[in-house]
Amino acid sequence: MKINKFPNKNIWSELIKRPVLKSEELTEIVAEIFKKVKESGDQALIDFNKKFDNAEVKNIRVSDEEIENAEESISEELKIAIQQAKENITKFHTSQIPVIEKIETTKGVICWRESRAIEKVGIYIPGGTAPLFSTVLMLAIPSQIAGCKEVILCTPPDKNGNINPAILYTAKLCGITEIFKTGGAQAIAAMTFGTESIPNVYKIFGPGNQYVVAAKDYCQKFGIAVDMPAGPSEVLVIADEQAIPEFCAADLLSQAEHGNDSQVIFISSNEKIFKQTIEETEKQIKELPRNEFAKESLKNSHFILLNTIDEALEFSNLYAPEHLILALKDFEKYIIKIQNAGSVFLGNYSCESAGDYASGTNHTLPTNGFAKNYSGVSLDSFVKKITFQNLSKKGLQNLGKTIEIMAEAEGLLAHRNAVSIRLN
Amino acid sequence: MKINKFPNKNIWSELIKRPVLKSEELTEIVAEIFKKVKESGDQALIDFNKKFDNAEVKNIRVSDEEIENAEESISEELKIAIQQAKENITKFHTSQIPVIEKIETTKGVICWRESRAIEKVGIYIPGGTAPLFSTVLMLAIPSQIAGCKEVILCTPPDKNGNINPAILYTAKLCGITEIFKTGGAQAIAAMTFGTESIPNVYKIFGPGNQYVVAAKDYCQKFGIAVDMPAGPSEVLVIADEQAIPEFCAADLLSQAEHGNDSQVIFISSNEKIFKQTIEETEKQIKELPRNEFAKESLKNSHFILLNTIDEALEFSNLYAPEHLILALKDFEKYIIKIQNAGSVFLGNYSCESAGDYASGTNHTLPTNGFAKNYSGVSLDSFVKKITFQNLSKKGLQNLGKTIEIMAEAEGLLAHRNAVSIRLN
């Protein structure tokens, strides 16, 4: 860990730097994978399963039987937990359904917006070290609330050709039964073009490794939308004198365990809390089973002592963290000062893992500084908003002259004529 | 114009095809321009002004004096029209400010979202055949309602080094006074990297030629967000027996005059209206000053006769038009069937040019079929939504076990520990 006491503001721009992503180098590899999937469809996916995941898979599509069996193989305890999380996530995302408000901008001119679900969406769930069934909840639930007609899920098989049962159980619980055994860039290609088994989609969601990231970049060339640009996960914790070092250390490590490149920043205005949190972090890390990841990611992480909480927030807004924890007594008065962050956790009992799993907020959030210009996933991500307008004859009479004058000044006389012909 | 009577559904996929954009070929040219702007800043912009716009410009930044003078050189009539449009656009976009709603998902667990303006945004306004001051309104007004701290505008100078006064007047009226004389890919590069005169921004809005489109694609590699992917403008008109052929023809032509590649589709279920609208279009086009554009774009445009309005809407949803006009008696009952469209105009008096200029809706809309997966510009485009959560000690006690079980099942024990350490 890198310890910075009262760093001068002119080096802050160094402290906020993220690891550089090398997605451009991967574009060629990804383009080749897209080409093969476009040409050979399912067969390409079967070949890639063998090549990259060492898995023999006959049917790309997960059978109903496999989904049924999954339900039996996971514990009651886990099912109940997943169901409680689902309830909370559903409650919070349902509250995001907008009310339609018709606005009369000029007498006789009524304008409004209505949401429509994106009809076809794809969810990507990575394989790898942890089966991310929580991400299934985060993406499937809002897709169902939005009313997306076709929601499919792609995830790589293990070497026996199976999908983790918690992923299958969660998907089914959320109404998703079109599940396909394919991972990496080839899964993104399949959802872009469609194959014999896999329908093409209009928007792709979900995290993944560097190939998936590059593929989600590449698929946009073919008109596919994606949830947001990607980067390694991050947390920034701001602590004052009443923060509890044990809690802060646990939060920092819960981020650090994600992977070697996770970003962890701790800021305090209190030297005692600062010192104790460093000590606690070093103590707790020894007990973690994934501590090889955590140790690696802590090497690049900053522990920063600053003069005031205001200064800490200034730094945080510059860094634009994915997760921001305010372990502050008066957190309420600092909310208004938060400009750039993905999701904010307030007070000593709002640990990041609450939002990662079960409080109800979405855990698909902007990383890599993208909290400056992107929102996290929400119900909005699964809909488009269409504007409507209805002008009565009277309405057009009231507004017509304005339109005619403006159209003429822009040199667009057919635009003007569309009004004139109606008014004459 | 291409006339299609009762086309079989298996050729619909042909009828919805857009002209293919060749943005990839331009990437190399654009990359070179970005490199020069990054290296040489303002000097590169001055050189490009000379090279591409044949303009000698000493100061990239428009002076206060130039802005003042602009006000004097445009007519009172136009000023009043712009002001009325501004009022309506302000009214409609202000209605999009969301109400903050705090949700208690589990007892003691409170979650909500708050909007924050994107701090630095850039608006691009093309030069060329028409001075698009209406686009200044559409992009500047929501940026001001959102509260963006820094809003800049780039637009190419004419060959005398000047900017059209209507653009300067409108920008100032909307509170924008940081205006720069630079166009094309170099303007996008300047807003991406910043130069001596031009600040860098986090998100770039606005239409442009193929170089601008390619540059807005390219700038995303550097972490810059953009409003939406681009394509030529489009309208699809659906008319029943009570539609007025003169009005329909005028609407079709107001789209066709935009440029050679504009897309125009007319659908009717009534043979008489179908025939009359074709005749009216041929008649009206002769009187248009920009009819060389309109004639060219009509060549690629489809006039389609279908059996029913339901079938017309099915076609429209497949095409996903930027603008959709329902010249229908019972338009209200068809609203729910509209799945994919940018902006919808209802009834005989809701001409597209109302929305282009002054009704209050935004005219920056998804083209090229992107209405399937993107919304048009709205207040949302200028903000990010941050999620907040506050768990009381009791709240974490209520939810803790669920989080612990899920974290353990994902193999993320530091995530579990962040809860356990608080509960013990």
Image (spheres, coloured by chain):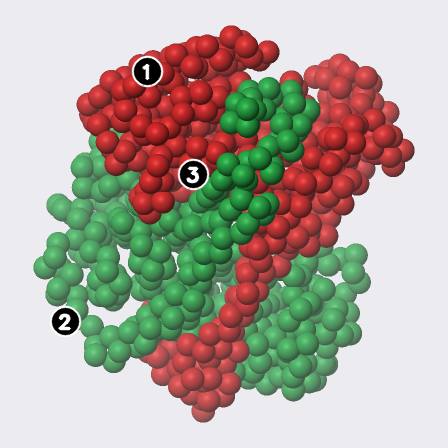
Chain colours: A green, B red
Viewer-closest of B347 and A180: B347
- Output the chain of dot 2: A
Residue located farthest toward the bottom when viewing the structure as drawn = B424
Image-based side of A120 in relation to B245, left or right: left
- Output the chain of dot 1: B
Question: Quarter-wise, where is residue A358 in the image?
Answer: bottom left
Q: Quadrant of the C terminus of chain B?
A: bottom left
* Residue type highlighted by circle 1: Lys
Image-based side of A403 in relation to B405, left or right: right
**Dot 2 surroundings within 10 Å: few (below 14), some, or many (20 or more)?**
few
Above or below — where is B134 with respect to B1?
Answer: below
* Residue type highlighted by circle 2: Glu
* Residue B369 in sight in this render: no
Instruction: Check disc 2 and report the residue beneath it.
Output: A72
Image-based side of B265 in relation to B161, left or right: left
Residue located farthest toward the right when viewing the structure as drawn = B65
**Which residue is painted at 54% across and 73% down in the image?**
A345
- Front tag of 1 and 2: 1
- Output the chain of dot 3: B
Please tell me the numbered disc located at residue B346.
3
**Dot 3 surroundings within 10 Å: few (below 14), some, or many (20 or more)?**
many
- Front tag of 3 and 2: 3
Distance, label 3 to label 2, CA atoms, is 53 Å
Above or below — where is B251 with respect to A90?
Answer: above
Distance, label 1 to label 3, CA atoms, is 22 Å
What SS does tag 1 mark? helix
What SS does tag 3 mark? strand
Viewer-closest of B6 and A385: B6
**Which residue is painted at 42% across and 74% down in the image?**
A359
Instruction: Check disc 1 and report the residue beneath it.
Output: B275
Residue A75 drawn at (x, y percent): 21, 77
Above or below — where is A424 with respect to A52?
Answer: above
